[in-house]
């Protein structure tokens, strides 16, 4: 939410002393759980705890909208993990109302700074940080700290839950992306469709969350959607559709990165990737409706 230089409270709704237009992230068939002036809770479901995913969901500093100079302290017990067999470890946390780039909040794991939270005003964004395995305490309590608004300029944020995920495999190899033009529901504009494949043994219903980032790692848009999926030979696909409007407003050519991916399914399967896919190096002039069209196109980088 906006920086609060002065605040009035009317019927339980907070409003700032100055206005700022919110930019909401919408995509086709997606539901974004954001309402201006209302602080949502639990907008992104947490992953299921298991022998490689450890979750903290109910603590005093979670689900609490905190402002300037506050420090959120969360404890997370991590059990018996053989770190020598782990490919990557990720710290995952959904943050609400991060007004990047003006608002700066830092995330720490056991005293180690992993950088700034990403997001947009009045929206939830799933932040993921690949962490150094040497910074993790096994069979012990690990301490996560969020340092809010380190510049002390009046910004606020809420953290819903935190998790640490251990990945024993490389990124699943068969992700893909494409541009879709002139779809009836896009008012003539195109959208970027990213298809993510993951191992899943049966037909089920899943909740999917994923964010789109520009080549500089800046947040473009996020998607939260519930979808029925089928399984073929133990593999399922989820299609994520990012509107041309969000990409055009970012005003940067690709390639774009899809990260903060969390898919939790009713059959107990979950798929989580801090960095899931890098798209083709699309240029803005390939998206119908973009008014800013840089002349140069970045070098092609495709990660499958």
Image (tube, rainbow, N blue to C red):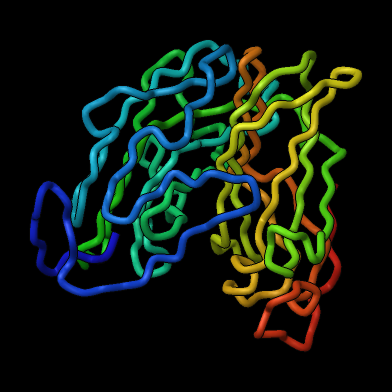
Q: Nearer the viewer, residue 163 or 44?
A: 44
Q: Nearer the viewer, residue 71 or 124?
A: 124
Q: Is residue 230 visible?
A: yes
Quadrant location of the N terminus? bottom left
Q: Is residue 262 visible?
A: no
Q: Nearer the viewer, residue 138 or 204?
A: 204
Please name the residue shown 53% across and 11% down the image: 80
Q: Is residue 199 left or right of residue 213?
A: right
In this view, the residue farthest toward the bottom is 295
Please name the residue shown 62% across and 59% down the image: 213
Question: Is residue 183 placed above or below 169 in the rendered structure?
Answer: below
Q: Position of residue 4 (x, y in %)?
A: 17, 64
Q: Position of residue 3 (x, y in %)?
A: 23, 66
In this view, the residue farthest toward the front is 184
Q: Position of residue 230 (x, y in %)?
A: 80, 23
Question: Is residue 68 placed above or below 276 in the rendered structure?
Answer: below
Hey, which quadrant is residue 174 in on the image? top right
Please name the residue shown 51% across and 16% down the image: 49
Please name the residue shown 40% across and 49% down the image: 34
Count of numbered tags: 0
Hey, which quadrant is residue 144 in on the image? top left
Q: Is residue 246 left or right of residue 34?
A: right
Q: Position of residue 298 (x, y in %)?
A: 79, 75
Q: Is residue 254 left or right of residue 150?
A: right
């Amino acid at each position: 939410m906006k920086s609060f230089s002065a605040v009035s409270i009317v019927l339980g709704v907070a409003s700032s002393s100055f206005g700022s237009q919110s930019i909401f992230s919408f995509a086709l068939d997606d539901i974004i759980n954001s309402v201006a002036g209302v602080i949502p809770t639990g907008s992104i479901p947490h992953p299921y705890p298991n022998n490689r995913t450890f979750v903290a969901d109910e603590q005093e500093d979670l689900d609490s909208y905190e402002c300037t100079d506050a420090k959120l302290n969360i404890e997370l017990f991590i059990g018996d993990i053989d770190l020598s067999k782990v490919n990557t470890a990720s710290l995952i946390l959904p943050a609400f109302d991060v007004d990047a780039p003006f608002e700066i909040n830092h995330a720490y794991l056991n005293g180690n700074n992993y950088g700034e939270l990403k997001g947009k005003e009045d929206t939830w964004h799933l932040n993921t940080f690949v962490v150094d395995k040497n910074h993790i305490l096994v069979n012990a309590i690990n301490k996560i700290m969020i340092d809010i608004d380190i510049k002390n300029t009046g910004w606020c944020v809420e953290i819903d839950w935190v998790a640490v995920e251990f990945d024993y495999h490389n990124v699943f190899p068969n992700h893909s992306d494409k541009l879709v033009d002139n779809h009836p529901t896009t008012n003539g504009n195109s959208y970027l469709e990213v298809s993510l494949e993951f191992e899943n043994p049966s037909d089920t219903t899943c909740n999917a969350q994923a964010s789109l980032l520009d080549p500089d790692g800046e947040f473009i848009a996020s998607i939260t959607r519930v979808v029925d999926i089928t399984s073929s030979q133990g593999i399922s696909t989820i299609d994520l559709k990012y509107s041309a409007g969000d990409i055009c407003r970012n005003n940067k050519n690709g390639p774009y990165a899809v990260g903060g991916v969390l898919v939790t399914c009713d059959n107990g399967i979950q798929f989580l990737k801090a960095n899931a896919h890098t798209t083709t190096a699309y240029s803005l002039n390939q998206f119908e409706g973009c008014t800013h069209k840089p002349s140069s196109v970045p070098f092609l980088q495709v990660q499958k």
